[in-house]
Image: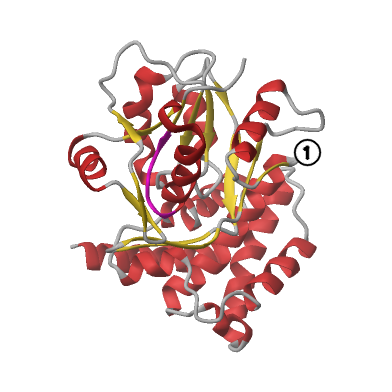
Amino acid sequence: MAIEEVALIGTGAVGGVYAKYLHAKYGNKFYVVANGSRKERILQNGIKVNEQVFFPQVISSDLKNKKMDLIIFAVKNYDLEQAMKDVKKLVSKDTILLPLLNGITASERLESTFSNSKTLLGLSMGIDAIRTTDGIVNTDDGVIQFGYEDNTIPSQEVIEVEQYLKEAGINAKVYPDMKRMLWRKWMLNVGVNQASAITGAKFKYFGQVKELLDLFRGAMLEVLEIAKASNVNLTMEDIEQIEEVIVNFTPDGKTSMLQDVEAKRRTEIDYFAGTVLEYGKKLKIDTPINNVLYLSLKAKEKIYLD
């Protein structure tokens, strides 16, 4: 099955960047899913990335008799339930679903709702994109990592998705052990996003403040223990590599979670430390650092959202 008609839901910083490439390459065969005021805003103002505005085709959740070959999910975790409702009429048994959400639960949630479709594991790694009041500022496109859990011999649909993305100029890579890559990024987020959000630290401080690095590492070590108990192939070497990347990252850059806290937006704490606590309880593994991070950030969020 050739991939022809594709929809993307979620045009924030990450989704907006990929929508730009897909619209430029595939034109009226590519759609953004939006409803209500968001739909009207895109129709009237378009999507702005690096000062360039484009106007993708917009389809709504009430559209009938239109099925997609591929649907890309670029929403926040807490918006996934609504996103699944919004795309329900666009999904058939042949539709490929590609989530690019943080955390490790998105594919499971998609599979439970669309059990007859083809759900991949996916993530966006290394993308540098910030949503501002004047559009999206994007300095690094990063790479989409995706596939089924085991891609030792990639399936036909995985090969087709890779080709579809690459032909649009999107860097895409299929890994043999995609579950490992998903958990690896989750471990990174549990460490750097939460440590930065609770302390207000820019990336440069991870290489300058020992206590911050200890907090960052400690949160990841708890994920490492959970991974070992869950037969996921993460190692201490992964933590060391992640630390090296972070301490050498854009010095004045900020994690997405810190940006959310500073803008007093809802965070994805439930899908970072929250998931760590769930696994820890189930596997009888102590997770004291993530417990404190969860309580602190959850309290902080509830106070500023009040």
131 left or right, relative to 93: left
Q: Quadrant of residue 60?
A: top left
Q: What's the image's color scheme?
A: secondary structure
Q: Residue 264: percent from the left, percent from the top? A: 28, 66
Q: Residue 34: percent from the left, percent from the top? A: 29, 35
Residue carrying label 1: 176
Whether the magenta-drawn stretch holds residue 80 is answered as no
**What SS does tag 1 mark?**
loop
Q: Residue 79: percent from the left, percent from the top? A: 35, 42
75 left or right, relative to 63: right
Whether the magenta-drawn stretch holds residue 11 is answered as yes
Q: Is residue 175 visible?
A: yes
Nearer to the camera, 98 or 110: 98
Q: Is residue 287 visible?
A: no
128 left or right, relative to 225: left
The magenta-colored residue range is: 8-13
Residue at position x 36%, y 37% from top? 56
Nearer to the camera, 251 or 133: 133
Q: Quadrant of residue 297?
A: bottom left
**Relative height, residue 149 to residue 44 (above, below):** above
Residue at position x 51%, y 53% from top? 277
